[in-house]
Amino acid sequence: MALELIKGNIAVAEAAMRAGLVSYFGYPITPQTELLEHLSARMPELGRAFVQAESELGAINMVYGAACTGLRAMTSSSSPGISLMQEGLSYLAGTELPAVIVDVVRGGPGLGNIAPSQADYTQVVHGGGHGEYHLIVLAPASVQEAVDLTTMAFDIAEKYRMVVCLLLDGFIGQMMEPVELPEFKPVRTTPPAWAIGSPDSKGQVVLTSINIDPPTQERFNVKMMTRWQEVEKNEVRYKGYFLDDAEYVVIGYGTAGRISLSAVRAAREQGLKIGLVRPISLSPFPAKVVDELADRVKGFLVVEMSNGQMLDDIISIVARRVPVEFYGRMGGMVPYPDEISNAISALVNGKHDVNIDARAEWLAGLRELVGTGE
Amino acid sequence: MTETDVKVVYKRPLGFTDRTTHYCPGCTHGVAHRLIAEVLEEMGELNNTIGVAPVGCAVFAYNYFNFDFVEAAHGRAPAMATGIKRTLPNKIVFTYQGDGDLASMGMGEIVAAAARGEHFTVIFINNTNYGMTGGQMAPTTLPGQKTSSSPLGRDVETQGYPIRTAELLATLDGAAFVARRSLHDARSIRNAKRAIRTAFEAQKQGLGFSMIELLSICPTNWGLKPAAARTWLAEHMLPYYPVGDFKVSTAVSEMKIGGN
């Protein structure tokens, strides 16, 4: 199939359609809106459901209803909209429903801006809604990877009856790249036996997240946690670069991972033995590879377009065996490769102190670089 | 033995389970449930219906009906019903919502769904208070009415005015049939059933959004015996919330309804 030059948001929308998306509900917000616009034309064209909701609250609850049919449902938004959807995500999780949400992350907090960011890591990976639940979170670093993960997201969501979040930063959503789109999959239009409106269910189907009896709720949560262990076993995804002989390893996902790769390649050209781990599944997190590397490398550099939200997870995995340093830009700013190269040099030539407060060190440097905003 | 001609005049509707009610003695939720079950049975739609339960006293509505049900977050039932109906357009879909759920938390969702002309039916229970949480002031609480969060009576200067939901939604072009009925006496209940039938028929025939507001009693939180609560409804609620048809689209007015 021929490569086509497509913007990330549109590529994800088209990939979702080809994966058999039956119902889409969304609300305009930059930098995600092209996804909604594309589906506003394409879904009705193929006789599928499209609703521009009254709000992100409306959109996620429409997804909640559509997901109860067991047919493929999706919404998309950007950070402030994803904040509004947290209530619905908790209900979807508490009802064991499959759905796909796309978060094209922008700078915050508050209204923030419309530039690319990775500051939604905490809210999607560690759960912004109430109660104990997990989302499966997939973070592509190119438009092609976004397309491939979109296709996969629906299958994984159905396999575990869980919500899968495609976490794109604004770069991946807005960037045009050559991609190969998948073929159209057959569309399932009959609800499965566990879903409402199914011809195959035996008797009444009630889908709810209420367990008024605490022991029942606890048993349900045990079941959910046990399923999550399966997800952790089967669904960890990452890409390793130059890890075999690496003495130091950079860890970054999405656009930060991609820019880090440029800096790692430059370091290799200078003879430095630097590797890169680019997590693709942020939840479940590729903890095992980081844990194993911590036994044999001299240090890590975490790179994020945030204040170090993934950093805390890495610190907990590495557990002071080797130094973990951090470089990030915030508020919609994106690091240049040479900023990461400088951070790599600092790691290699530094004090190798495992007790270093990586965030404090980084913040001191960033204060020098960009000012304090006071 | 002489044969007696026995005619069954009252039985459990086919759409009901045989579970014992959890509603308070005298509460009209049971009446509203029964009218829905009877209408769906008469329409032959029991096996083709999906209900959306609210947060509130009717949170366990699905325990009493025997067809498929989902349970919405507080106020979000119209969005959830939109998702279901758009995905499975041949199903009969309805939400069952109280006044805190629909007219406070979920006012955005209900207005938007009505404006879009979503093809589902809303059964709206107006009993002037938040029943499940113990009788707090609702958007429907009458001026001067005492509740657990308006202990001196609703003061419209600081707590605002009640919302007449049926009249409000009737202004929207997407609404095909919007009516208010009362459940305080037998004649009103029969009228309510006819309106519910019209609403579901409008949905079945794809004519647009339909909502029936049902004036209901809450003896427990009102601190009245059921008979006194029904009188209170007639004397205080009916003047503020008149029964009537507030929106009947041309298509609905020309609609033919089979059966009784």
Image: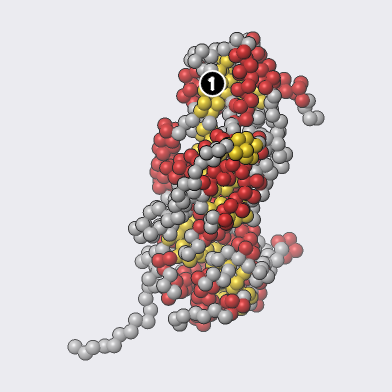
Q: Position of residue A237 (x, y in %)?
A: 49, 30
What residue does disc 1 label? A241
Q: Nearer the viewer, residue A223 or A336?
A: A336
Image height check: is A107 above or below B128? Answer: above
Q: Nearer the viewer, residue B124 or A216?
A: B124
Q: Tell me the chain of label 1.
A: A
Element type at marker 1? strand
Q: Nearer the viewer, residue B46 or A43?
A: A43
Q: Residue furthest right?
A: A374
Image height check: is B79 above or below B164? Answer: above
Image height check: is B137 above or below A77? Answer: below
The N terminus of chain B sits in image quarter: bottom left
Q: Position of residue A337 (x, y in %)?
A: 67, 22
Q: Is residue B221 visible?
A: no
Q: Is residue B29 visible?
A: yes
Residue A137 is left or right of residue A340, and the answer is left
**Colour basis:** secondary structure
Amino acid type at mark 1: Tyr
Q: Position of residue B171 (x, y in %)?
A: 68, 70
Q: Quadrant of residue A279?
A: top right
What residue lies at 68% left-to-right and 65% top-to-bottom?
Answer: B154
Q: Nearer the viewer, residue A283 or B20?
A: A283
